[in-house]
Image: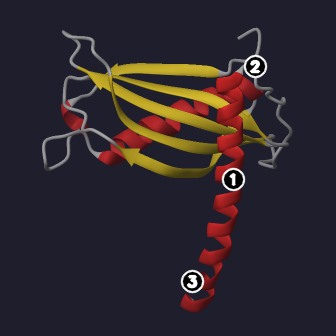
Amino acid sequence: MSKQQREVTLRFLAEPGDVNFGGKVHGGAVMKWIDLAAYACSAGWSGKYCITAYAGGIRFVKPIHVGNLVEVTARVIYTGKTSMHIAIDVQACDPKELENQLTTHCIMVMVAVDEAGQPTEVPEWQPENAEDKALRESAIKLMNMRKEIGEEMEAHVKFIK
């Protein structure tokens, strides 16, 4: 790639090996696709190897069926010093009809790392329009909420020890 890439879409067919006992695509398979798209997007933006720091708010809206054409779109919506917040939308449809429906949505936080595995700086992303600004503000709000939840979870970790 010659320049930073803010968005990437992975496309493929849901296969029989992706199915759970209920006959629909397994949530774990969807989560793997989400992680792959988040990696491709964050590496494309930063030009560096990236690791998953957080996967949250995963909403399974509709099931995905075997044979569906699946599109996993990942887009940078906020950058920190070493992290990138990536919005993920998963859509699926019967390939004969091509009427995509949202099936899953979430936010991933990816961190760029150097050869020693230490966090390294990423290029800053700046919103270009009203939608981008709203997405950025949403990412900041979610980041603050995650901090509060993390502090609350610390009480549970201390209790378990």
Sort mark 3 into few (<14), some (14-19) or many (20+) by Cα contacts within 10 Å. Answer: few
Circles 2 and 1: CB atoms closer than 8 Å: no
Q: Position of residue 32 (x, y in %)?
A: 43, 41
- Marker disc for residue 93: none
Residue receiving disc 1: 143
- Type of amino acid at the residue the image marks with label 1: Met
Circles 2 and 3: CB atoms closer than 8 Å: no
- Please indicate whether residue 118 sits to the left or right of residue 85 in the image: right
Q: Residue at x 76, y 25 (%)?
A: 127
3D distance between C-alphas at marks 2 and 3: 41 Å
Q: Colour mode?
A: secondary structure
Q: Position of residue 112 (x, y in %)?
A: 75, 40
Residue receiving disc 2: 128
Residue 94 in view: yes
- Marker disc for residue 156: 3
Residue 42, picture quadrant = top right
Q: Earlier in the sequence, mark 1 or mark 3?
A: 1
Q: Position of residue 141 (x, y in %)?
A: 68, 50
Quadrant holding the C terminus = bottom right
Q: Earlier in the sequence, mark 2 or mark 3?
A: 2
3D distance between C-alphas at marks 2 and 1: 21 Å
Q: Earlier in the sequence, mark 2 or mark 1?
A: 2
- Type of amino acid at the residue the image marks with label 3: His
Q: Residue at x 27, y 27 (%)?
A: 14
Q: Residue at x 56, y 20 (%)?
A: 8
Label 2: state its secondary structure: loop
Sort mark 1 into few (<14), some (14-19) or many (20+) by Cα contacts within 10 Å. Answer: some
Q: Nearer the viewer, mark 2 or mark 1?
A: 2
Q: Is residue 12 above or below residue 158?
A: above
